[in-house]
Image: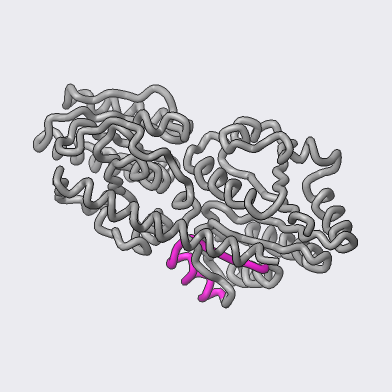
């Protein structure tokens, strides 16, 4: 039987370790079910594809002189003749549809997917959080979903949005990061005493809302006060996204006025060096989903300091895994309690969730790509 040909859309923030994490995890899954083709024609994604681990034979530039869309359509036509299944995989990441422009884009995408369905292409949307505001955006997403064979969101709150829009085929697939495996027990750590704590925060969710940014800094100061009152440890300020570096430096300068155990991690935390940083941290505080979901893989307790109304994807995922108590709203954080004795127990409980979610993901991909 001829292997499936899988066209994989990889348009993401190019300097975001969290995006690399989920796209790389999905790539590793797709390789098990066919030959993967990634559009590498845009130079801005060159480093992103390198971090993802895209092989030369998976690059569109090595496969065809045509565009990504033209290549997919041509291969779909050929597939009808030689009986080869062609698939189009898309949807990864956070999607907020709130404007007429986004609704129009959805309708144009629906027209394209309708053509693919005529050519019997298997269309898969997976790995996304979604928010739909307004009837027009809800209706446009509902129309688009008609032409999607497998429609998966990554949390129950996104599923609720879709069901309210009339998308009955929507199902939940665990966040793709759960399926990314790291080498276990390859880093030293003092598990009986808190010695290193990491902060990894973004201010970009607020754009230029100085009041909100100040609230975030107040919450971070509260954390530093608590840590220094209860533990003899180091606090490291890090970042997983290049865009976050300036705010990380600002936080470091701000905290250094009050405390002498503050250090700045100059290099971006990536999948390649995460073991060095998260592997030596006992606790990681962050308002980035995949800083939290990467840190626990290396034995660090992930605690989210988030803006609940603006960061529903984090709320949804932590609710689904049964750990909403690991999240604190920045405007309501009055107290926090960390027990050195509970860290290993909580991290192990999250790893048990990871094991179950990885099994679920594997079963979902078997179902998607079964002959």
- Along the line of sight, the residue nearer the viewer: 7 or 359: 359
Color theme of the render = one colour
Q: Can residue 24 be seen here?
A: yes
Residue visible at 43% across and 35% down? 240
Quadrant housing the N terminus = bottom right
Q: Can residue 210 be seen here?
A: no
Residue visible at 27% across and 38% down? 217
- Along the line of sight, the residue nearer the viewer: 131 or 318: 318
- Along the line of sight, the residue nearer the viewer: 337 or 354: 354
- Along the line of sight, the residue nearer the viewer: 366 or 8: 366
Which quadrant of the structure image shows residue 237?
top left
Which quadrant of the structure image shows residue 319?
bottom left
Q: Residue furthest left?
A: 229
Left/right placement of residue 77 relative to residue 46 reads: right
Please state the horizontal and vertical placement of residue 115, each as a whole percent of the image: 81, 64
Left/right placement of residue 186 relative to residue 17 reads: left
- Find the magenta span and give its range: 149-165
Please state the horizontal and vertical placement of residue 265, each as a whole percent of the image: 35, 25
Residue visible at 86% across and 39% down? 65
Please state the horizontal and vertical placement of residue 92, each as a whole percent of the image: 57, 53
Q: Is residue 50 above or below residue 205?
A: above
Please state the horizontal and vertical placement of residue 269, each as a whole percent of the image: 42, 31
Q: Residue furthest front?
A: 1
């Amino acid at each position: 039987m001829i292997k499936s040909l899988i066209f994989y859309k990889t348009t993401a923030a190019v300097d975001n370790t969290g995006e690399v994490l989920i796209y790389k995890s999905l790539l590793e899954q797709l390789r098990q079910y066919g030959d993967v083709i990634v559009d590498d024609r845009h130079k801005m994604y060159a480093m992103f594809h390198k971090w993802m681990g895209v092989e030369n034979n998976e690059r569109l530039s090595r496969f065809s002189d045509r565009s990504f869309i033209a290549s997919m359509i041509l291969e779909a036509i050929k597939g009808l003749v030689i009986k080869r299944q062609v698939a189009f995989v898309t949807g990864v990441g956070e999607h907020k549809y709130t404007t007429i422009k986004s609704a129009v884009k959805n309708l144009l995408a629906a027209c394209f997917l309708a053509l693919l369905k005529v050519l019997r292409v298997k269309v898969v949307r997976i790995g996304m959080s979604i928010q739909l505001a307004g009837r027009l955006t809800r209706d446009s997403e509902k129309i688009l979903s008609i032409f999607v064979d497998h429609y998966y969101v990554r949390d129950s709150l996104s599923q609720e949005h879709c069901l309210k829009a009339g998308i009955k085929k929507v199902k939940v697939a665990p966040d793709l990061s759960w399926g990314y495996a790291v080498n276990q027990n390859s880093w030293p750590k003092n598990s009986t005493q808190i010695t290193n704590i990491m902060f990894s925060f973004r201010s970009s969710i607020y754009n230029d809302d100085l009041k909100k940014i100040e609230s975030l800094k107040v919450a971070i100061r509260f954390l530093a006060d608590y840590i220094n009152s209860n533990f003899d440890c180091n606090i490291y300020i890090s970042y997983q996204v290049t865009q976050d570096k300036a705010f990380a430096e600002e936080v470091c300068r701000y905290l250094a006025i009050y405390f002498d155990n503050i250090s700045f991690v100059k290099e971006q935390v990536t999948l390649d060096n995460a073991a060095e940083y998260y592997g030596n941290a006992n606790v990681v505080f962050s308002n980035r989903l995949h800083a939290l979901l990467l840190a626990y893989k290396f034995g660090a307790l992930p605690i989210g300091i988030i803006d609940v109304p603006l960061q529903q994807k984090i709320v949804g995922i932590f609710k689904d895994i049964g750990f909403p108590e690991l999240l604190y709203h920045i405007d309501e954080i009055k107290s926090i309690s960390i027990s050195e004795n509970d860290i290993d127990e909580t991290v192990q409980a999250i790893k048990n969730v990871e094991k179950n979610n990885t099994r679920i993901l594997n079963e979902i991909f078997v179902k998607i790509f079964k002959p």
